[in-house]
Image (tube, rainbow, N blue to C red):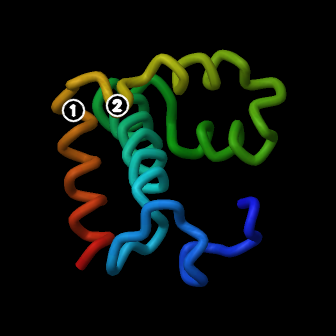
Amino acid sequence: MKRGLDVYEGGERYPRNGVCFGQRGCVDVADAFAAIKKLVFDDKKITMAKLMEALKSNWEGHEDIHQLCLKAPNNGNDDDYVDDIFNYVSLKCNE
């Protein structure tokens, strides 16, 4: 950030060959996919349409959905549910 360079211009602090959005990006993607998988597909607590509506409104009027997403499984907690998604995303990103 300080240098004003993106990952493709060498701005990543710890560059890796073939990385499409950096390690932190893989973590964020895995967390997002885990929340979607858990809340929409596995537990069916919300629909994808409702989630998209909440995201488009930046959570305004959808604080309940925001809280569900914040409490969803996330990476870094030795949770295979998310770690498996992270490993898949990270592997695909580095192909």
> Residue drawn at (21%, 65%), measured in percent from left and top?
91
Q: Is mark 1 on a helix, strand or loop?
A: helix
> Residue drawn at (59%, 39%), measured in percent from left and top?
51
Q: What residue type is labelled 2?
A: Lys
Decide if residue 81 is on the left or right side of residue 4.
left
The residue pinned by badge 2 equals 38
Q: Which amino acid does label 1 sit on?
A: Tyr
Looking at the figure, which quarter contains the N terminus?
Answer: bottom right
Looking at the figure, which quarter contains the C terminus?
Answer: bottom left
* Front in this rendered view, residue 4 or 30: 4
**Marks 2/1: CA distance?**
9 Å
> Residue drawn at (83%, 29%), measured in percent from left and top?
60
62 in relation to 15, above or below: above
> Residue drawn at (25%, 70%), measured in percent from left and top?
92
The residue pinned by badge 1 equals 81
Q: How packed is label 2: few (under 14 Cα within 10 Å), some, or many (20 or more)?
A: many
In the figure, residue 45 lies in which quadrant?
A: top left
- Tell us which disc is closer to us: 2 or 1: 1
Residue 22 image point, x, y percent: 45, 63
Residue 5 image point, x, y percent: 69, 74
